[in-house]
Image (cartoon, rainbow, N blue to C red):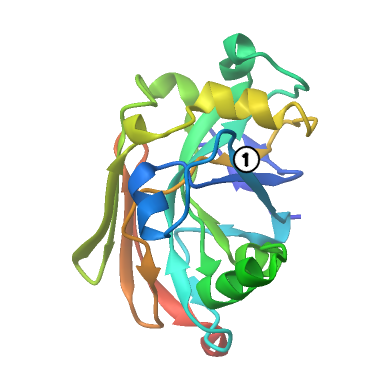
Amino acid sequence: MNRIKRTDGTVFTPSKILAVGLNYAEHIEEMRSRRTSEPVIFLKPNSALTSLREPVQIPTQYGSVHHEIELCVLLEKPGFQVSEEKAMDLVGGYGVALDLTLRDIQKKAKERGHPWAIAKGFKGACPVSEFVPAHQVKDVQNLQLTLTVNGQIRQSGNTAQMLFRIPELIAYVSRFFPLEAGDLLLTGTPSGVGPLFPNDTIKAEIESIAAIETKCLGWEDE
């Protein structure tokens, strides 16, 4: 089981990684999709976790691998069927995550009405930073997200643009999943997603949380 760390030294082992799709309007447009009345939820396995401070491993044999920068919420308390009013009581920290996606495989799955599990859950598909304690982030719904690749800005957005905000997301997923300490919630990505290749240099930044620069390597380079 992969573990994550908060900057105060606390270590957590997530039982699951919950992720939200289509939570920024411009990303919905670029994906030629439609806005939904409820959050779109999918899962990544714990085995997809890896450190964003290590080189990002890019599988080269399965088609295009896209970057999606996201605010990642760390839950430090358990909860089930939590109200929106009490949802933030579960939050223990915030981090920067990449929701790496095998886009060609995902596209085929969508066309066939199949799940996205492989496209979203492959080895290394969820690089994350260390987590800042929640009390250190003054306004989590007004944070700038920026992802650059080889010095060029690819993604730029603000958490104020989320269609479903964090308390609503936590309350929604807790209707179906008993939440446990250490679980992670990826909250969606702004527009500008695109391919990564071995030898690319990426910088993932969310204000007040982290700014991390790293390299991309192909799986064959391990």
| Residue at 52% over, 88% down | 221
Quarter of the image where the N terminus is located: bottom right
Question: Could you tell me residue 38's position as x and y percent?
Answer: 59, 34
Is residue 55 something that shows in the picture?
no
Amino acid under disc 1: Leu
Question: Could you tell me residue 177's position as x and y percent?
Answer: 78, 34
Quarter of the image where the C terminus is located: bottom right
Q: Is residue 153 left or right of residue 55?
A: left
Question: Could you tell me residue 41's position as x and y percent?
Answer: 64, 44
Above or below for 29 versus 87: below
Is residue 80 something that shows in the picture?
yes
Q: Is residue 181 left or right of residue 200?
A: right
| Residue at 36% over, 59% down | 30
In depth, the one of 56 and 31 nearer the eye is 31
| Residue at 72% over, 44% down | 13
Q: Quadrant of residue 139?
A: top left
Above or below for 10 versus 5: above
In depth, the one of 31 and 197 nearer the eye is 31
| Residue at 50% over, 77% down | 58
Q: Quadrant of residue 86?
A: top right
> Could you classify mark 1 by the number of other residues whose Cα lies within 10 Å: few (under 14), some (14-19), or many (20 or more)?
many
Question: Could you tell me residue 149's position as x and y percent?
Answer: 28, 68
Tell me the element at label 1. Answer: strand
Residue found at the very far top of the displayed protein: 85
| Residue indicated by mark 1 | 184
